Amino acid sequence: MSIAALLGAVRETLAALPEPAGSAVRARFHHGAETAVQPLWPEIVARHLPAALAAADPRHGLVPALAAAARSLRWVSYDAYPPHLIGPEFASGHAFASLIGEEDAPFLVDDFNLGFFLVAPEILYRDHRHLAPELYLPLTGPHGWRFNGRGGFAPLPAWEPVWNPPMRIHATQVGATPFLSLYAWTEHAMTPAEVVLTDG
Ligand SMILES: [Fe+2]
């Protein structure tokens, strides 16, 4: 029940998502029947997800829905980055859980991935890019963002969507609260992301 309710809350959230992300994500949003997933609740999630959920505004229905379903999801780390390029702090300081995806997700689909992404406080998620067009909708904030590998980090508040077109370089400086975000990769979902070495 909690997974189905979370899917419903995601659907409502996407219905209210502004452009350009709104149309792009809704056009690709699809899911089949719910299947069993083996839940995984690693240390990084146990340590930071409760604080992130406590800091998120519960008037957004996504927050209580995620709180109710979080332990039913499979939280894993993203292993496509060489550890020395992404840095040990990020490598051991994040987790994500797919709600809809090609593997480890309660809803299995081709070439679309949507879920939740958690990063521990004060960690820099270094410049990176990927072929997948990407939505971030942070449930917490502010966190610092920069784009195209240049300049300083500008703070964005919670619930301010970030839409990354294919291969746009982006980096996130997590603030004092854990970074917790809804994310979606609308296509090219199995093409790995890559770290981009920049001056900053
Ligand atoms: Fe990204």
Image: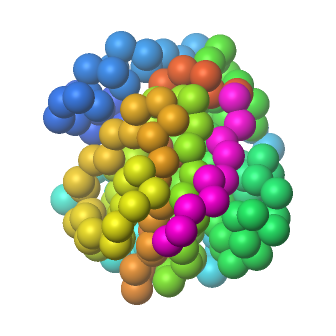
x%, y% of residue 126? Answer: 57, 64
- Magenta region includes residue 193: yes
In the image, 84 versus 98, the foreground residue is 84
- Magenta region includes residue 41: no
Q: Indicate how the structure is coloured in the image.
A: rainbow
In the image, 1 versus 145, the foreground residue is 145
- Judged left or right of residue 59, residue 191 is right
| Figure label count | 0
x%, y% of residue 134? Answer: 45, 36
At x 63% / y 59%, what residue is drawn?
Answer: 197
At x 19% / y 30%, what residue is drawn?
Answer: 19
Q: Main secondary structure of the magenta part?
A: loop
Q: Which residues are magenta?
A: 191-200
Give the image quarter of residue 12: top left
x%, y% of residue 47? Answer: 63, 80
- Residue 6 visible here: no
Q: Is residue 45 above or below residue 3?
A: below
Q: Is residue 199 above or below residue 182?
A: below
Q: Is residue 45 above or below residue 20?
A: below
In the image, 60 versus 194, the foreground residue is 194
Give the image quarter of residue 112: top right
Give the image quarter of residue 95: bottom right
* Extreme residue toward the front, this view: 199
- Judged left or right of residue 158, residue 193 is right
- Residue 198 visible here: yes
x%, y% of residue 70? Answer: 56, 56
At x 75% / y 30%, what residue is drawn?
Answer: 103
At x 45% / y 73%, what residue is drawn?
Answer: 173
Q: Is residue 111 above or below residue 174?
A: above
